[in-house]
Amino acid sequence: MGVMRNIVAIYRKELQSYFASPLAYIIAGAFWFLAGLFFVVILQTGIQQVSAFDLQGQQPVDLPSLIQQNFLQVMSSLALVILPILSMGLYAEERKRGTLELLATSPITNWAVAVGKLLGVLTFFITLVLPLLVYEAIAFDAANPPAPPWVLLVGHGGLILLAAAVLSLGLFMSSLTESSILAAILTFALVLLLWIIDLIGQNLGGPVGAAFNHLSLLKHYTNLSQGIVDTSSLVLFASYIFLGLYLTAQSIDILRFQRS
């Protein structure tokens, strides 16, 4: 129970810091503006394509699924830019202010601090995603036949899992430096590598190439964005989340040892 109280305390502190930060509101405004703009463009493009197919007498297209897949792919690219910015100061600012040493030597476990910080920033990202679900649901409800709600939920659940994995890795990068900008750059570079690692795997081939393909964030996110619930995809995202938290805790443990 003590650990849970510590996690909740860190979680509330981090979440309040985001809603009190002008940068967070700038990020939210930019995210919602770009998301709405891309959705309108993708929706109009999809309607035009379906109209062209109808005129040519071609096979009908599942417009809602097509729009959602294209929109979620764009949102994942946008998230890869925003998420490193959200995670860059989680520990870097603590180092810069000199409060990380106090945190490292406090009775609160490193795992509790890391989990609380991750849940705080992830909750803030979820508040950015929820409005997208509202106008997508309104648009897809007008389709004939209406899009199944579970497809919408699975796709956005994949976006949240992707965010949790990226933020967890960003948490680790932030624990290594007192420069928030450097932490954001390192996080973006690492995530970009994991995003396109399947291309490396395709060139290598064999068992090594297959392993690289399995590590790709893009491959597993694409499955979920299409409404495909694959156990291997869920396990991979959970593994990245755990890895980021574990490395962060070890990083702070090293700092604790240096200060003892």
Image (cartoon, rainbow, N blue to C red):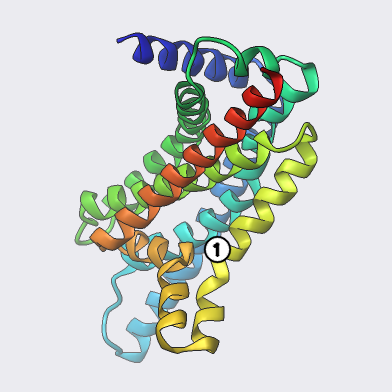
Side of 117 relative to 182 (left or right):
left
Q: Residue at x 23, y 49 (%)?
A: 149
Q: Is residue 156 visible?
A: no
How many marks do you count on the picture? Answer: 1
Q: Residue at x 46, y 80 (%)?
A: 208
Q: Report the quarter where the C terminus lies.
A: top right
Q: Residue at x 67, y 53 (%)?
A: 188
Which residue position holds label 1?
194
Q: Quadrant of residue 24?
A: top right
Side of 173 relative to 93 (left or right):
left
- Please say if 87 is above or below 94: below
x and y, in percent, of residue 41 in the image: 55, 60
Q: Secondary structure at mark 1?
A: helix
Side of 247 relative to 63 (left or right):
right
Q: Residue at x 53, y 30 (%)?
A: 121
- Please say if 62 is above or below 235: below
Q: Is residue 133 visible?
A: yes
Label 1 crowd (10 A; few <14 / some 14-19 / many >=20): some
- Please say if 102 is above or below 31: above
x and y, in percent, of residue 119 in the image: 45, 28
Q: Amino acid at mark 1?
A: Leu
Q: Quadrant of residue 115?
A: top left
Q: Report the quarter where the N terminus lies.
A: top left
- Please say if 133 is above or below 222: above
Q: Nearer the viewer, residue 7 or 29?
A: 7
Q: Nearer the viewer, residue 213 or 226?
A: 213
x and y, in percent, of residue 204 in the image: 53, 87
